[in-house]
Image: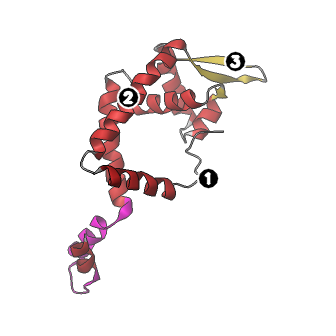
Amino acid sequence: MLRFMVLLMKKNNSLSDRATATRQTSVGWMIQRLARMLERQMTDRLSEFGLKIDHFIILMNLSERENVTQTELGDGISMPNYAITRALDHLEGEGLVERRPDATSRRSHRVFLTKAGTQLMPSLFATVKTVNETFLAPLPDAQRADLAQILMTLMDPNDQTKLPG
């Protein structure tokens, strides 16, 4: 990485060299690439359960806090209403979630895990653990812990993509 930083500092390098150095030293670019790699691995593993990433995100959110409206659920995970509806339709069809009328609003529904959804969660937790362990395998334990701490430090405590509540 130091080599690319030196390249970036030289004024007589070509535009291509400077672009490469900028990209390869960009923390944002690296995090985005790593996120894509993790998402591909999760997508592959979730397909074994007949699930997609959107389904997984909803199930994980509901396992932490159910009895939320579809709108609250979507807002909490930054998912548009149409995508929430589509994902909930699938999950409801699979018997993993149920929507119940909201007692305070005729137009709203509250979302709950079903017994089958609740029973599936330990398998999904194990999947997350396996994917994370595989992904982090090249790092020694101390670096894994350091990376987790650094990422937690960088996360915005006001980020609306975190769970509601």
Prevailing secondary structure of the magenta residues: helix
Observer-side mark, 3 or 2, equals 2
Q: Quadrant of residue 3 in the image?
A: bottom left
State the CA–CA distance, disc 3 to disc 1.
Answer: 30 Å
Inspect the magenta stretch and tell me whether residue 18 lies in it: yes
What is the three-letter code of the residue carrying label 3? Pro
Secondary structure of residue under mark 2: helix
Observer-side mark, 2 or 1, equals 2
Q: Is residue 61 left or right of residue 164?
A: left
Question: Label 1: how many residues lie within 10 Å, few (<14), some (14-19) or many (20+)?
Answer: few
* Residue highlighted by disc 3: 101
Instruction: State how many labels appear.
Output: 3
Say whether disc 2 or disc 1 marks the residue closer to the N-terminus.
2
Q: Is residue 118 left or right of residue 2?
A: right
State the CA–CA distance, disc 2 to disc 1.
Answer: 28 Å
* Residue highlighted by disc 2: 126
Secondary structure of residue under mark 3: strand
